[in-house]
């Protein structure tokens, strides 16, 4: 980082390296970076995309510090949606919860939560029977697997 006196012609400043007009970026909002307040983001700067640097004025002196611009983040791989099995293609199956109280979801493959049966609750003056029996609920594909009465088998349920 070196101090540079930028040349101002007409409406803006020009890059001392390549001679192009610098792009003015006004200051933004205060940011928290690694648990600390970053006031650098509040100050205006002048960017040169060709040279890959930006200039910030030093205490209103007319001299500017040059800083390298952050490289753009690498393009991330497109997120592929997991293929969900159709509910009609899922046969009844035995689901057992593991030590952490979860098991793999037969529909999407993610981890499902086990919900233990609870007493009947009154909601808006009506009996809520949804969580009375033990069942598995997947937070990813929002599937619910309920026990088939009198067996160890679970089947996908609409609700």
Image: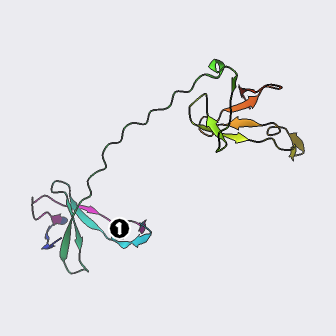
Q: Quadrant of the N terminus?
A: bottom left
Q: Which residue is mark 1?
A: 41
Q: Residue furthest front?
A: 99
Which of 3/87 is in front? Answer: 87
Q: Position of residue 57 (x, y in %)?
A: 23, 74
Determine if the magenta segment contains residue 156: no
Span colored in magenta: 13-32
Q: Determine the residue positioned at 73% across, 41% down.
A: 115
Q: How many labels were placed on the picture? A: 1
Which of 51/139 is in front? Answer: 139
- In the picture, measured across the screen, residue 75 lies left or right of residue 114, that is left
Quadrant of the image occupied by residue 94: top right
- In the picture, measured across the screen, residue 87 lies left or right of residue 123, that is left
Determine if the magenta segment contains residue 29: yes
Q: Position of residue 37 (x, y in %)?
A: 42, 72
Quadrant of the image occupied by residue 106: top right
> Badge 1: few (under 14), some or many (20 or more) residues near its Cα, within 10 Å?
some
Which of 65/87 is in front? Answer: 87
Q: Secondary structure at mark 1?
A: helix
Q: Position of residue 146 (x, y in %)?
A: 75, 30
Q: Main secondary structure of the magenta part?
A: loop
Q: Quadrant of the C terminus?
A: top right
């Amino acid at each position: 980082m070196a101090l540079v006196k930028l040349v101002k012609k007409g409406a803006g400043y020009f890059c001392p390296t390549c001679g192009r007009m610098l792009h003015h970026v006004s200051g933004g909002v205060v940011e928290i970076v690694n648990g600390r307040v970053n006031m650098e983001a509040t100050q205006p700067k002048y960017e040169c995309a060709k040279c890959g640097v930006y200039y910030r004025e030093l205490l209103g002196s007319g001299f500017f510090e040059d800083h390298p611009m952050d490289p753009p983040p690498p393009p991330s791989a497109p997120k592929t949606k997991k293929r969900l099995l159709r509910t009609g293609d899922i046969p009844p199956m035995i689901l057992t919860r593991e030590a952490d109280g979860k098991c793999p979801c037969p529909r999407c493959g993610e981890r499902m939560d086990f919900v233990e049966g609870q007493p009947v609750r009154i909601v808006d003056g009506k009996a809520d029977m949804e969580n009375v029996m033990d069942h598995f609920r997947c937070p990813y594909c929002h599937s619910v697997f309920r026990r088939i009465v009198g067996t160890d088998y679970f089947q996908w349920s609409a609700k």
